[in-house]
Structure formats: structure tokens, C-alpha cells
Image (cartoon, rainbow, N blue to C red):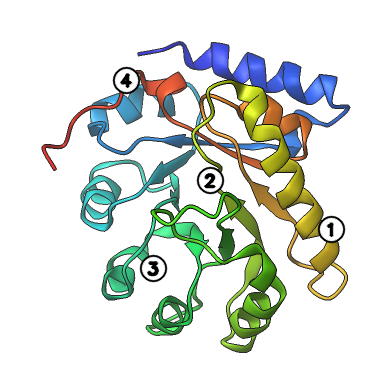
Amino acid sequence: MTDYTDVMDKVSTAASKAGRPVDDITVVAVSKTFPPEDIVKVYDQGHRDFGENRAAELADKAVALPADIRWHYVGALQSNKTRIVRGLVSLLHSMDRRSLGKAWMKGQGTAPPVLAQVNVGDESQKSGVDPSGLAEALEWMEALGLEVRGLMAIPPLPEHAEDSRPYFVELREMRDRVVADHPDVLELSMGMTDDYEVAIAEGASIIRVGRAIFGPRKSTGA
């Protein structure tokens, strides 16, 4: 396993360079494909925010691991899987369509907050709202009763960390444009192992880091 403290040191350094308090940045340790024993090693170092992208895997881990973990669902979610995920997570990062929003609002209790996913790279294989339709999407999300906390994006895979900077700038500027009409849309979930330091420099409040914390992804056989 890669050194967790090294990642956290880099996060602190990047925040300092950007003139930001490190406490403003939530590091989501993306634990998909990794077994509970690997997650516990990070948990035992004081970490509490973990991310998954498969409903069944999340459900299995949630019952096997400490109850004070804050789970984040960071992948595309099928509407028929919301009943599994909804009661387990503190934040859904991938709200992007009405059918998912309607499904998310069903069920007992208050629905967890969400982030609107934006397809900043216009990639057909990725989920997300088209940037030109963000304002309209936020309107229908809030009309459904969703608590929208901010925006999330997964830029095209970068060859170099700096390749992601324009996409991070774009997401931040989109947030700045909509926040007047949607004052709770503040969070920016952007940046992963290859570019999280650049994301922090451009205003990320949530970064999603897997490989740098856990090492190479383990195959699920899928």
C-alpha cells in the first residue's frame, strides 16, 4: 500500500501553496475493489471518508466496517440501485438525470445530499450534465427536492497533471456563475491520483484519491 501520510502531506502542501486551509479539503479515499482489511489500515490512521462506485460492493463493505465511516458514492448509479446506496452514503457525487433524481428522493427519511456531475470533457462514455445545460439541470434537481451541495467532474485522463487544469478552471467558473441563484452549490469535487494537487490549486474542496493511497487497482474479474 502506498504511504497514506505522503498523500496527506502533499494535500497539505498544495493547500498551503494555494493559500487555503487544509481543513477546507476533503480527501475521499476511493477504496473500490479493495478488501475491508485494506480500508481498515487507512481508517486506523484516522481517515473517515471513503468512496465506492458499485452498489453491491458498497453494501458489503458498509456492514463489515466501522459505522462512523462516511461513504461517498463516486460512480455512475443506475436508478434501480438507489435503494441500496441511498441509506449508506453521506454524499452522492454523480447526480446527472431526472430519473436518478426521482429515484433518489424515494424512500424513508431525508435523502442524502448530492453533487451535480458535469461532463466537462464532452466524453460519450462518461456520465454527466452537459455544461451548457447546468443551470437548467440545477433547476430540476432542486425542484425535485434534491439537496445539491456542489459540482463534480471527471476530466479526460491526463498525460500530465497540468492537462487537467483547464477542466478544473471550467468547473470552478461554472460554480461561480450558478452560485448566485443556487447559494448552496459550493463544493467542487475534482481531482484524482494523477492531478489532485492541480485540482487543489484551482479550488477543489473534495478530491477523490484511490491509487495513490491504496496502490494499483485490484481486478474484480468484471
Q: Quadrant of residue 35?
A: top left
For the C terminus, the quadrant is top left
For the N terminus, the quadrant is top left
- Secondary structure under tag 2 reads loop
Q: Quadrant of residue 115?
A: bottom right
At a point 20% along the width and 50% down the height, the residue shown is 60
Mark 1 touches mark 4? (CB < 8 Å): no
Identified by mark 2, the residue type is: Ile
At a point 77% along the width and 40% down the height, the residue shown is 203
Give the CA distance from mark 4 to mark 3.
28 Å
Residue 86 — which label? 3
Q: Is residue 101 above or below residue 89?
A: below
Q: Is residue 201 above or below residue 212?
A: below
Q: Which residue is mark 4?
A: 216
Say which label, 1 or 4, has the lower sequence index. Answer: 1
Q: Which residue is mark 1?
A: 176
At a point 69% along the width and 37% down the height, the residue shown is 25
Give the CA distance from mark 1 to mark 2.
18 Å
- Secondary structure under tag 3 reads loop
Say which label, 3 or 2, has the lower sequence index. Answer: 3
Say which label, 3 or 1, has the lower sequence index. Answer: 3
Mark 1 touches mark 2? (CB < 8 Å): no
